[in-house]
Each structure stands twice: as C-alpha cells, then as structure tokens.
Amino acid sequence: QAQLAESGGGLVRPGESLELSCQASGFMFSLYPMNWYRQAPGKEREWVASIDSTGRIIKYADSVKGRFTISRHNLRKTLSLQMNSLKPEDTAVYYCNTRDTWGQGTQVSVSS
C-alpha cells in the first residue's frame, strides 16, 4: 500500500526558511514523478511544484518560482521542498502527492 508522510512544517516569520520532507513507502518511488501541493484556509488545494522520476525535469508555480526548490532522493525514497523567503501568503497545509496517493499534510504558518 502506497503511503506518504510529510514533516518539517512550523511557524516562521516572513523572510525565513523551512524545509519540508516527504517519506514514501509501499511503492517503487524511483519510478514516479512527485508533486507538492498546498491548501490555504478557505481556498482550494493548489499545485506548488513537480519533479520527474529522475529529478531532471522540475516545474514550479509562478507564486513560488525562485524561492522554493523541490528535490528527491530515490535511494532514501524522500521528497523535499526547500522554502526560502517565506511570505504570509505561503501559509497553508502542504501535501506531497503521486498519482492518487496523498500524505496527511504538514502545516506551514508564516506570520510576524
């Protein structure tokens, strides 16, 4: 059974950084593209970033381009999201995803 588990969220001030991690299990992680999504209070879930199975093809939403970096370690079966220069509008629950599998999410709050 495929499972994803996010960690690394927290409360930070504007301009600070956080790194999220997602541990995968139960499937051949190295074969699948992975995604990060987020959902802010009262808003729909939105796509943040994607990375292909090899780590060579990466895409970002315009709202995070230049500030966030997605990466993966196929041997460790982990997906990461380095978030720099955080803004209050980045406040959301962040989810990792592949196909129809979602983690439980990790809360990121950015506030002064």
Image (spheres, grey):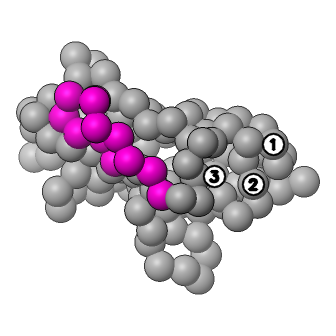
User: Magenta region: which residues?
Assistant: 50-61
Nearer-the-camera pick, 93 or 51: 51
Q: Secondary structure at mark 3?
A: strand
What separation in Å lies between label 1 and label 2 (alpha carbons)?
Answer: 6 Å
Instruction: Give residue 108's mark.
Output: 3
Residue beneath label 1, please? 15
Residue at point 31% right, 22% down?
73
- At label 2, which amino acid type do we have? Lys
- For marks 3 and 2, the one nearer the N-term is 2
Disc 1 crowd, CA 10 A, few/some/many (<14, 14-19, 20+): some
Instruction: Give residue 87's mark.
Output: 2
Residue 19 at x, y = what percent?
Answer: 57, 33
Find residue 63 and report its image quarter: bottom right
Residue at point 55% right, 80% down?
43
Residue 77 at x, y = what percent?
Answer: 25, 26
- Magenta segment includes 13: no
